[in-house]
Image: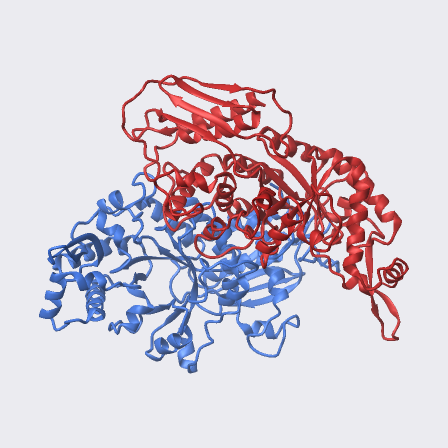
Chain colours: A red, B blue
Amino acid sequence: MLQEAFKRYYGILVSSSRHEPATSNVKTTGGNSLGYMDSLSVNLSSPCEGRPHVGMTESYQLEVSKDGAFLSSESVWGILRGLETFVQTVTLAADGSELIIKESSTTDSPRYPHRGLLLDTSRHYLPMSSILRTLDAMEASKMNVFHWHIVDDQAFPYQSEKFPDLSYKGAYDPRTHVYTRVDIENIIEYARLRGIRVIPEFDTPGHTRSWGQGREGLLTTCYKYNNQGEVVPDGSYGPIDPTKPETFDFLEQFFEEAILLFPDEYIHLGGDEVNFECWKSNPAINDYMNANNLTGDYAGLEEYYVQTLVDKLKKFNVSNIVWQEVFDNGVKIDPNTVVQVWIESDSKNEMSRVTAEGHPVLLSSCWYLSSIASGGDWKKFYSCDPDEFPGTAEQKKLVQGGEACMWGEYVDWSNVESRVWPRACAIAEKLWTSPEAFKTDSKFKSDGASSYDIKDVEARLEEHRCRLLRRGIQAQPPNEAGFCPGEHW
Amino acid sequence: MLQEAFKRYYGILVSSSRHEPATSNVKTTGGNSLGYMDSLSVNLSSPCEGRPHVGMTESYQLEVSKDGAFLSSESVWGILRGLETFVQTVTLAADGSELIIKESSTTDSPRYPHRGLLLDTSRHYLPMSSILRTLDAMEASKMNVFHWHIVDDQAFPYQSEKFPDLSYKGAYDPRTHVYTRVDIENIIEYARLRGIRVIPEFDTPGHTRSWGQGREGLLTTCYKYNNQGEVVPDGSYGPIDPTKPETFDFLEQFFEEAILLFPDEYIHLGGDEVNFECWKSNPAINDYMNANNLTGDYAGLEEYYVQTLVDKLKKFNVSNIVWQEVFDNGVKIDPNTVVQVWIESDSKNEMSRVTAEGHPVLLSSCWYLSSIASGGDWKKFYSCDPDEFPGTAEQKKLVQGGEACMWGEYVDWSNVESRVWPRACAIAEKLWTSPEAFKTDSKFKSDGASSYDIKDVEARLEEHRCRLLRRGIQAQPPNEAGFCPGEHW
């Protein structure tokens, strides 16, 4: 893993020396030369871990002085983050003749352990190249969780080996618009080498229209009254039908395959936006509810579905992330189940409620990249802070971080890179850097933990955007005017 | 010109046959085969014109029957538009084995003569490739005016041969972020072959900060009171200084060069958003105004500037387009000067006022592509109509069309294609197709001239977006979900 990382970052350094010196934001002061550096010493003080995992150590120390450059960490993940910092610290001399690094002593660690990005590959398909470049940009921005919202109502690109009909009938094009086992393994490996966890989301029982095309009987048949006043199927389908025992047999087999394929300890079970209208219309569903003391309680039926699914999956030794509705509906979820808050209204109180019950929590409600506005709209992302909700210190400790969400409506390979980057970097900085860090920097206002000078953020983001461009990410300009030194086309 | 067009469109046809059949929106009905077509007969009934020009004929007739395919027009521009329609009418058979065209008889002509797109190359530079692909996409969407907002406050990428310091000191990078004479000639020629006029805009007297860097004394020096209560320069500069005679000598020489380089009959003189604060602060400006019966009348000074410039340029036999402020400030402009309406508030009444005075008018206020919103925001562009303002039939005749404006804040090569396309196509359709056309199509509502079924527009836009992608334009998805048949990466 480290050899791969050395190769990758050495390539970035070498290509930096082929670019123009920065003329705008990055200033390399003259100063006195302390000598030439011909190596970076890397000291990994604990055994190498194979896979990025929840709570992994990412802290590192980087010392640059006349005695040389030294990067050390207890973990391979810390080394990865430190290498990123190291190459970001190297700049090209004003005359373009050599690379320069200043004396520095850095002790760095992330504010939150979970710094995620959600991509949705159902509303529009994203080719492998888009996903791999996303992982490159995540590494450059020290993000560590790729939340893969892989299927949804619109399309089912996940190719299951046990149930090939799901993608054969549910993908936009089963020949081209699918993710094969090999594709997925490649994405997981590419992410692993960058210290990025891949958490798949198979959202049920709602958002499953595309599942129904390759799996007859899985979805609830919706009914209507016909002209004769009889209740008849209306031709459409609703959420997964939780009243049939074969539903859970299928789900157990389906999830077993997915859990074996995706090595992360967590799987995202979705659970958002379940529409009850179809359940209400279906006579068999209502018969079942009457027979099980659930008459009229559709949220109870949803709870029953999620509870049964969660219980079935326990044997696979996997932990769960769920959207906030699962918590809101009172499902008895394990204490370590992570609740992802996404509904914008009342989200601060939701953070309070979830953590008051002792659940780890992720913030996403203010970080929807699909919400776009004219101007530098990354500022609204930057102004949001996961710790800002009413709660005790104990509750704050349950905040795992958050995720930038790039829902797939109106986005595919043609615009996903420029839509996500560098807007997601504003979120990445909030998730990595503690507001305390700003206090010690004289450039930042010191009148409060979360105060900052937006002009400085602007400049950092402009600089980082140019860095992403140099690494082949089609990141859009974050600010009103400007250019990247040495950019060419 | 036609040989070039035949080659270009033949290439598009051939590449269509290498794509997947459309499976979503375009339906090729089975029907009876009427035979095989091996050629398209093109009949140009008047001599070929060399350059696209204001009021050029673009109407054409296209007949496809068992006797063959016949395209005819009085003008080469009509042939170009007809070729575009012809290749759009050809589809791939469902089994991918052959190209299919249906029997049809089309008589087509544009609703408005001026169907423009503005690109701004000052806030961010756009490389040649971005501009050329924009021209390709404009041709595919039957747009015919490229309004090139080439310089502004932020940067001066136009390389003048008489005044090389302007770009040498005013461009982001004078080596790479400039348009040379050869670049500009290539763009004009590329556009000409596609029946697209190139109208440059050199916006004065405001929006000229970048001019000042390479031309000392051109801009107004702004003054402030110092601690001793004396009036002293504050280090900043305002609009062009109209009180110095050398200003107009420079402008005459500058514009002469530009007018010789850009062959269009029109040049855009800008004239928007002139800030009076700097003029107010400058003692010499106020002395001049006092001496010329303009005391306190800064709009009058602006009028004097524009009037003098327009008079100086008369000898070059060029007509003008101006932003609406020039009209609003009462400058005595020629009757054929075109006024471009851009201020959103009160724009319908502005259209009335301009046309009541007998001026040709262009609508842009509702077509700012820089204004972005979540969702399919092309719908707001589509709902806007240039003829919908209070006025007589005579006034309506003065509506020349309109322009989609892609201002350069937050946009450069990385996102300009996906930001403009296919959103600008919604505007292009409003400018080409008369609402009357919808009346005769049973798919459209018939309850009024401008009523239409947005679902049909959605489908056409989805289809056209896929067409743009196949031609190498990085157009973004206009709708919530979907894919382009045969797309690959």
Image height check: is A489 above or below A405? above
Image height check: is B353 above or below B479? below
Left or right of B348, for residue A406: right
Residue B348 sits in quarter? bottom left
Residue at the spot 53% in from the left edge and 46% down from the top edge: A420
Left or right of A223, for residue B238: left
Q: Position of residue B204 (x, y in %)?
A: 26, 59
Image height check: is B157 above or below B319? above
Q: Position of residue A356 (x, y in %)?
A: 64, 49
Depth check, front residue: A456 or B78? A456
Left or right of B188, for residue A152: right
Residue at the spot 63% in from the left edge and 24% down from the top edge: A49
Residue at the spot 11% in from the left edge and 70% down from the top edge: B290
Image height check: is A439 above or below B309? above
Counting labels gives 0
Depth check, front residue: A161 or A285? A285
Residue A160 sits in quarter? top right
Q: Position of residue A253 (x, y in %)?
A: 82, 40
